Each structure stands twice: as C-alpha cells, then as structure tokens.
Amino acid sequence: MKRLLQLISLVFILIGTFLGLIYYKGDEFLIFAISISLFFTIIFFFIVDMLIKNKESIKKRKFSNLSIFLWFCFLIFSLTSSIFILHGMNVQINAKSDIQKQTLNKLNVLNNMTTQFQKVVTKDLNDFNNSLDTAIYNYTLSGDNNGKYHRILNSPPYNLKKSQIAKLNTKNARQRNKIIESKLAARKQKFEKEKADVNFKIEKFLKDNTNTIKKWHVLELNTSFYLLNSMLSDNKQQLTNAFNKHKFNEDSEFKCNIPTQTIPLNNPMELWKIYKTNYLIAGVFLFYLFMLTPYLIHGDKKRKYVKSNSNWEGGIEL
C-alpha cells in the first residue's frame, strides 16, 4: 500500500510537470518537457529511497550531513517541480474553459476579417464609380469649357487616356459605361489580390488550428494560442495597408476590432493572479506527502528473542 501511494504520486508529478511545461512553452519544447518530467520523477524516487535506506542513521544523528543534504534536495526539487505542476493544473482545471471561449471568439474575428474588408472596399468602389460617372457627365456637358474636366479625367485617380476621353459624349453611353467598368475592375483587382492572399493564410490557419482549440490538443495548444494573436494583428495590418494604398475616398477606413484581452498562458505567475490556486497547492502538497509515505511508515527491523521454558535444575516433569 505504501509503495502504491508513492507510485501514484510519482505518476502525478510526471504528468503534472509535463503538462505545465507544455502549456508554458508549447510543443517546440516537447523533448525538453519529457526530459525534465522524467528527471523530477526519477530524482524524487531516489531521494525517498535513500531516506528509507538511511532512516536508522538519520534518526540517531538528526543533524547529520546526509540528513541535511537529502531533505534540502527534496525541498528544492519539490518547490521547483510544483511551479510547473501548479501551472499545468491551473490551466487544465481553472483556465481551460476561458481559453477556449476567448480563442474561439478570436477565431470568429479572424474568419470574418476579409468579410469586413470587402464591405469597406465595396463602398469605396461605389464612391469611385459615382465620382467618375459625375466627372464624365460634367465633361460631356461642359462644351467649350471642357478643358478643365479633360484634365480631371486625365489625372489621378481616374487616369483616362486622351483617346478614351475623346470618345466621350452625351450620345455614347456605351463608351462611358465601358470605361467606368474597366476602371472599376482594375481597382477591384488590386483589393482582391490582397484579400485572396489573406484568405489563403486564414483558411490554412483555421484548418490546422481550430480543432486544437475545440478538442483541446495539449501539445499544440500553446503554439496555436499565440499564433492566433499574430495572425490577427498581421492580417489586419496587411488589409489596412492595402486599403489605405488603393482607396479612393480619403475619409474611409478599414476597421476590425481585435479582442485585446489575452490569458497569460506562458506566464504562470500572472495566471495565478487571475485564477486562485490555494486548493491546488493543498492537493500538490498532499501528493508530495504520499510520496514520502514509504519513508514515514518504514519501521526498523528488531530482533525477536524466544523465551526458553527449560528447567535447569534437572529432572523430568511427569
């Protein structure tokens, strides 16, 4: 029974330390997390084993060098491993639901980002369409004063060729519509190129990482969690730059509200400020106590003497 409790506590330390390190650093540190977890498990086993083997000498000399060294090592390794264990338990028990809720909300924002972009692009293209149509209309009606409107159509943002302008008149509506459609298509293509690039990155990210959040894939969680923040900011910046570069209306803006709140998955101390860990600390302490059970209940073997009933005065009792 005493060894069973020790085994349970060692398995707890192995898994708890591994989870804490993976949540803290991500799957890029997988080998490191496995190595550290095994190290703590093995070192605790040998410390307790040494305490058991030397219990008699430790009892006789309570302040022996061996006693001080073993208990000092146990204390140091316990404090160190408990940091990772508490972080793993805190994420798994306290923060898991909030992390999933927050990340799924961000995934939704990421997924709708290009939709928001398309709305402002459509409005900007409509503004350009109306402005160009008005400029052409003014040119065709200007008569002898069409030099002013000729320069407007020949300059940015319309950039009509002189040959195109020469064909414009009130009777040639087909030519006017053809020019407007051509200019709109050229502007739209510039926006579409940026949108397609961002869409490709978003779709790939969602395909690779959505299930990591929804189904809580422990190994990839840290990586997906922080990569999502980068994807949101990078893609928003790309779309903002593209819109500002190609937009017609100077007053229009591309706006996408990215949630700024984030759970400090890679900062155990900050996470403890958000989620209280008092009961978790008590649980970890209990498992360390279980680990010491073989030492605490280990008894010294005592020699047993059999009392003799021999009659040394001689004679046989009948």
Image (spheres, rainbow, N blue to C red):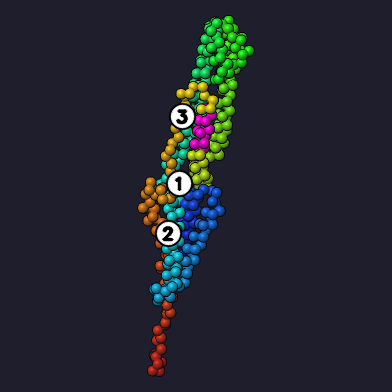
Q: Is residue 278 above or below residue 198?
A: below
User: Regarding mark 3 in the picture, which secondary structure is present there?
Assistant: loop
106 or 131: nearer the viewer: 131
Q: Position of residue 218 (x, y in %)?
A: 50, 47
Q: Position of residue 228 (x, y in %)?
A: 50, 39
Circle 2 is placed at which residue position? 79
Local crowd at mark 2 within 10 Å, few (<14), some, or many (≥20)?
few
Q: Residue at x 51, y 22 (%)?
A: 248
| Residue span colored magenta | 231-243
Q: Is residue 189 left or right of residue 88?
A: right
Q: Is residue 267 above or below residue 289?
A: above
Sequence order check: which comes first, mark 1 or mark 2?
A: 2
Q: Residue at x 58, y 18 (%)?
A: 159
The label number, if any, that marks residue 255 in the structure image: 3
Q: Position of residue 121 (x, y in %)?
A: 51, 24
State the image quarter where residue 310 is shown.
Answer: bottom left
Which amino acid, by three-letter code, is at mark 2?
Answer: Leu
The label number, if any, that marks residue 265 in the structure image: 1
Q: CA distance from mark 1 to mark 2?
A: 20 Å
| Residue 101 shows in this picture | no
Sequence order check: which comes first, mark 2 or mark 3?
A: 2
User: Regarding mark 2 in the picture, which secondary structure is present there?
Assistant: helix
Check if residue 268 falls in the magenta segment: no
